[in-house]
Amino acid sequence: MSDATEDAMTRTARELLETATGELAPDPRSNPLVPLIARGEADRAVLAALALEQSWVIPADRRAFLHLADRAGPEPAAYFTALAEGEELAARHLAVFGAACGVDRARADAYSPLAGCQSYPAYVAWLALNAEPPDAVLALTVNFSAWGGYCATIAKALRAHYGFGDEACAFFDFFAEPSPDLDRMATEAIQTALEEGRLNENRAHRYARLLQAYEAMFWTALV
């Protein structure tokens, strides 16, 4: 296969991802909390609740990604394994953010998570059990684009308005930073699925739309 043919095939997967990300971008009004944080108007108790809710989300998503990796072919498996490893690192950063928000063991143990926040990881778990792995790759990658933007805004605001240092902001910095390796793995997984006829675009779009809706519920529940 010539380099030109390989480039054209790669562009097909990239264009699919770019198109889906553009079409399924969330309405800016669907997230009422991040603008409050961006202006420094969110109470610190809300930041603590954000940390506590994420302490439930991160381990749940990690296990879901590992299950998807077990069910997937080589390309999606590499993508999901990388996601799971990222969640493990994120959990360590999250503990520092939580401590900066005044979350200790007693407060964490006493906390009751909100259904509106935990609907997102519940749906990721549903995908892990029911979705075809290539469809889940597309849906998750589309959602991560919005999540990364939110994290970049929060990281900047925590420094500007709340006096948080780099270590306390590392959780959000981690997700805000582009990941060329993850992008490459997602593109390769989707390209392989396209070539083998294993990607159902309509179904993947439905999954992505639901993920975006559950993401919006997460932020709304915290306000």
Image (cartoon, grey):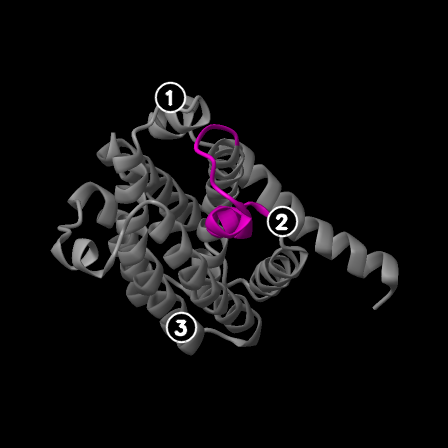
Q: Point out residue 3 in the picture as x, y percentages from the top left corner.
A: 87, 62
Q: Secondary structure at mark 3?
A: helix
Inspect the magenta stretch and tell me whether residue 165 lies in it.
yes
Q: Nearer the viewer, residue 60 or 154?
A: 154
Inspect the magenta stretch and tell me whether residue 217 lies in it.
no
**Residue at coordinates 68% horizontally, 50% vertically from top-left?**
12
**Residue at coordinates 51% horizontally, 39% vertically from top-left?**
155
Q: Secondary structure at mark 1?
A: helix
Front: mark 2 or 3: 2
Q: Main secondary structure of the magenta part?
A: helix
Q: Point out residue 154 in the picture as x, y percentages from the top left corner.
A: 47, 36
Q: Secondary structure at mark 2?
A: loop
Which residue matches tag 1?
Answer: 29
Q: Amino acid at mark 1?
A: Arg
**Residue at coordinates 40% horizontally, 64% vertically from top-left?**
132
Image quarter (top left, top right, bottom left or bottom right) of the C terminus:
top left
Q: Amino acid at mark 2?
A: Pro
Above or below: residue 187 compared with residue 16:
below
Q: Point out residue 21 in the picture as x, y percentages from the top left corner.
A: 53, 39
Image quarter (top left, top right, bottom left or bottom right) of the N terminus:
bottom right
Which residue matches tag 2?
Answer: 178
Q: Which residues are magenta?
A: 160-178
Which residue matches tag 3?
Answer: 66
Above or below: residue 133 compared with residue 48:
below
Q: Amino acid at mark 3?
A: Leu
Of the numbered discs 2 and 3, the one sitting upstream in the chain is 3
Labelled disc at residue 74: none
**Residue contact between numbered discs 3 and 1, judged by CB atoms under 8 Å:** no
The answer to whether residue 26 is left or right of residue 192 is left
Q: Point out residue 85 in the picture as x, y percentages from the top left corner.
A: 49, 69
**Residue at coordinates 54% horizontally, 52% vertically from top-left?**
174
